[in-house]
Image: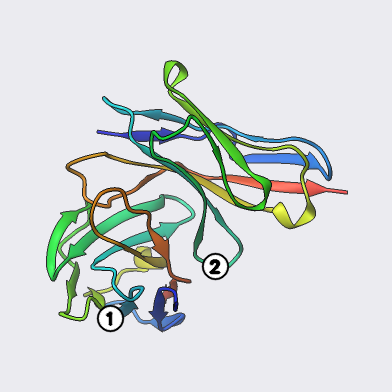
Amino acid sequence: AQSVTQLGSHVSVSEGALVLLRCNYSSSVPPYLFWYVQYPNQGLQLLLKYTSAATLVKGINGFEAEFKKSETSFHLTKPSAHMSDAAEYFCAVRLLTGGGNKLTFGTGTQLKVEL
Amino acid sequence: KAGVTQTPRYLIKTRGQQVTLSCSPISGHRSVSWYQQTPGQGLQFLFEYFSETQRNKGNFPGRFSGRQFSNSRSEMNVSTLELGDSALYLCASSNTGGFTEAFFGQGTRLTVV
């Protein structure tokens, strides 16, 4: 069964600093991988997705993530944090076959951006 | 194109009651999945419906059930509500064929008192 581990339930950065949110997956074969963002009292918004087409994936709002099979990682980065990036971020995995559209989520990382 | 619509947005129910939540997927999407989000358990998969058939089911008691109609709209029902059922319930819709991504609704905040 696939699973996702997000290291760090809370991350705090200064505005303008690098954002790095960590995600490691466990799956017998490389799955589909996603990063979602959630603002308070809202649903989940897709930031980016890995579908094996390219290991470096660019998403919305300046975020990107790199798939590293050898490290089973899919860390999310943004070169310069903005106050509006403060939210909760979720890494998710989906099997390539056999799992339908079922997503397995990590426990989330709350990003705080300070002046 | 309209997004995923969930109704109602907020709901307060009493223990022992039952509740029905509704989800209208993006037009043309035939897959609807439901998730429960709580501070303690995080985001957990409830079930997925595709073309009116349950395709996947998570590890939840039988009190949680769902269905999908021919227009792809879906409902989930929770019977005999417990305090622990208080959560944000999220619906996601996906297209069909090959790789698809899930688009989420705003959720229904259920409070059981």
- Residue that protrudes farthest toward the right in the picture: A115
Q: Which mark is residue A42?
A: 2
Number of numbered discs: 2
Quadrant housing residue A26: top left
Q: Amino acid at mark 1?
A: Thr
Q: Position of residue A115 (x, y in %)?
A: 88, 49
The quarter of the displayed image where residue B36 is located: bottom left
Q: Is residue B112 visible?
A: no
Secondary structure of the residue carrying tag 1 is strand
Residue B49 at x, y percent in the picture: 19, 64
What numbered label is drawn on residue B20?
Answer: 1
Instruction: Tell me if residue A36 comes above or below residue B27 in the rendering.
Output: above
Q: Nearer the viewer, residue B50 or B37?
A: B50
Q: Amino acid at mark 2?
A: Gln
Q: Residue at x 41, y 62 (%)?
A: B103
Work out how far the residue at label 2 is from the one at label 1, CA to CA, in angstroms: 20 Å
Q: Nearer the viewer, residue B38 or A78?
A: A78
Chain ID, mark 1: B
Query: Residue at 45% of width from left, 77% of height from top?
Result: B1
Q: Which mark is residue A97?
A: none
Q: Is residue A59 left or right of residue B16?
A: right
Q: Is residue B104 left or right of residue B19?
A: right
**Secondary structure type for disc 2:** loop
Where is residue A27? Give x, y as percent: 30, 28
User: Where the C terminus of chain B falls, by quadrant?
Assistant: bottom left
Instruction: Tell me what residue is drawn at x 54 percent, y 67 percent.
Output: A42
Judged left or right of residue B35, residue A86 is: right
Residue B107: % across, % down: 44, 71
Which residue corresponds to the image point at 45% horizontal and 51% vertical from the top-left? Answer: B40
The residue positioned farthest toward the left in the image shown: B53
